[in-house]
């Protein structure tokens, strides 16, 4: 939504066909196929070995020294410093958490492969990748809208589901593990719908409507508030008074409609759904509490206390993914044996690996915005980075999500391409 809507190349014209291996990874991440396999077949990570092979092939084919960039270096330093510094507290006891090292290294490999592929493409091909990814997210949004239909074909009992999104009957999750991930996918879709050109204004509005409906059906507080933030940012970057007025009226109408639905219970919402809508309105009005944040403020307070005891170093990998001694996960009204994580990626990196990786991580998030501020890709860069920050503010496992890996790879690739756009102009002076 933060974006100029100028054309980002013509996606119909390209000097070469897109690599099928790269398209395969785009399909895997865009449609969250591991979760789909878990949902319909009951097998978690079934596609991971195949995807690992594709990742290695793509990396070997496209990894070149000339494709290295500062933003990619910052991403690499973030992951490697986090893993290295996060492992040090447990080296004395030879109790290094291999589980998280494996998962985060897989993230590094997947993002790297997709980055090297995208950054090697010409403008028309990059445009094609963005359009394809947009339609993949649109398909994912349709899956969210028809969550109840998809659940009829699930391969496992909801009580024992690997696919945890099945347990939240009042919230749609579609092809994703939980409703919050589905909501984030809808936000990414909205950004691409607004930024990328469409055949007609009507078709753009239809796509926007699909994404908004999917977003609302997840009843994700963070994502709905994030949508408001993105809309406000979009309006601030508009130079057209007509577009600004149109979006302002749309937002005002949406807010009034949301209040009217809540007040008069037009769709017979469940108690949980009504509470979530009320919390969104309260949070938008500035009320931040344990109730409106579904207990996240309590987890953040516990996380801050834990950080104080280890600052400026870290407590070790996994310590903030599941904070022992904090709050246990509640499932179907029953307390389980699982400890909840801090639900914040920033605190996870700071708490598990210390100050140095945390500062590198902040630099990694800031640099794409700096590099892409005058780029034709700035709408994608700004929008994706803002969603990533919103997502990371409410979850601690964002870097482990394969859908998020794709958006990170796209962001750093187009940011790297943005820096190259400036090089020819400098040579001319």
Image (tube, grey):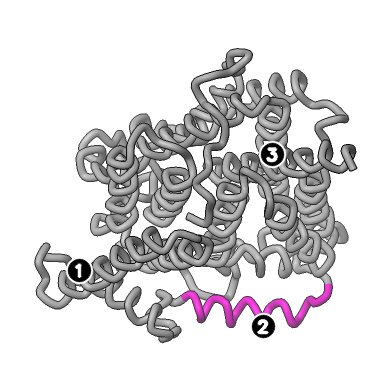
Q: Is residue 159 visible?
A: no
Between the residue at mark 1 and the residue at mark 3, the CA separation in whole angstroms equals 39 Å
Q: In terms of sequence position, does the residue under pointer 1 or pointer 3 come before the other? A: 1
Q: In terms of sequence position, does the residue under pointer 2 or pointer 1 come before the other? A: 1
Residue at the spot of label 2: 305
Residue 9 is left or right of residue 304, and the answer is left
Residue 45 is left or right of residue 138, and the answer is right
Image quarter where the C terminus lies is top right
Residue at (78, 38) in percent of width and height: 420
Residue at the spot of label 1: 257
Residue at (51, 81) in percent of width and height: 298
Q: Cβ–Cβ below 8 Å for labels 2 and 1? A: no
**Quarter of the image where one finds residue 293:** bottom left
Q: Of residues 53 and 112, which is closer to you in this image?
A: 112
Q: Could you tell me residue 195's position as x and y percent?
A: 49, 45
Between the residue at mark 2 and the residue at mark 3, the CA separation in whole angstroms equals 37 Å
């Amino acid at each position: 939504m933060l974006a100029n809507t100028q054309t980002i190349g013509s996606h119909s014209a390209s000097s070469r066909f897109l690599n099928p291996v790269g398209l395969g990874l785009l399909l895997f991440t865009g449609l969250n196929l591991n979760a789909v396999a878990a949902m319909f077949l009951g097998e978690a990570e079934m596609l991971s070995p195949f995807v690992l092979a594709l990742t290695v092939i793509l990396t070997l084919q496209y990894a070149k020294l000339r494709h290295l960039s500062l933003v990619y270096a910052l991403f690499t330093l973030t992951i490697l410093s986090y893993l290295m510094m996060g492992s040090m507290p447990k080296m004395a006891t030879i109790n290094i958490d291999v589980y998280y090292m494996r998962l985060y290294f897989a993230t590094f490999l997947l993002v790297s492969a997709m980055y090297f592929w995208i950054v090697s493409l010409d403008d028309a091909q990059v445009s094609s990748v963005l359009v394809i990814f947009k339609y993949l997210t649109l398909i994912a949004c349709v899956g969210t809208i028809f969550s109840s239909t998809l659940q009829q074909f699930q391969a496992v009992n909801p009580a024992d589901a690997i696919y945890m999104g099945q347990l939240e009957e009042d919230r749609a999750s579609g092809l994703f593990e939980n409703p919050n991930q589905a909501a984030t996918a809808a936000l990414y879709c909205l950004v691409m719908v607004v930024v990328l050109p469409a055949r007609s204004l009507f078709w753009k509005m239809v796509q926007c409507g699909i994404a908004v409906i999917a977003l609302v059906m997840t009843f994700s507080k963070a994502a709905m508030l994030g949508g408001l933030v993105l809309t406000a940012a979009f309006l601030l970057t508009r130079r057209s008074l007509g577009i600004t007025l149109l979006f302002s009226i749309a937002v005002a109408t949406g807010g009034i409609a949301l209040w009217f639905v809540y007040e008069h219970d037009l769709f017979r919402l469940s108690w949980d759904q009504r509470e979530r809508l009320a919390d969104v309105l309260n949070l938008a009005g500035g009320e931040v509490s344990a109730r409106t944040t579904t207990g996240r403020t309590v987890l953040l307070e516990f996380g801050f206390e834990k950080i104080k005891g280890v600052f400026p170093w870290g407590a070790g990998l996994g310590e903030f993914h599941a904070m022992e001694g904090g709050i246990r996960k509640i499932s179907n009204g029953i307390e389980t044996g699982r400890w909840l994580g801090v639900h914040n990626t920033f605190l996870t990196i700071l708490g598990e690996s210390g100050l140095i990786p945390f500062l590198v991580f902040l630099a990694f998030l800031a640099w794409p915005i700096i590099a892409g501020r005058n780029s034709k890709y700035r709408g994608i860069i700004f929008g994706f980075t803002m969603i990533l920050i919103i997502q990371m503010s409410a979850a601690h496992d964002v870097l482990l999500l394969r859908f998020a890996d794709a958006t990170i790879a796209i962001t750093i690739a187009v940011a790297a391409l943005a820096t190259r756009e400036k090089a020819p102009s400098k040579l001319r002076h």
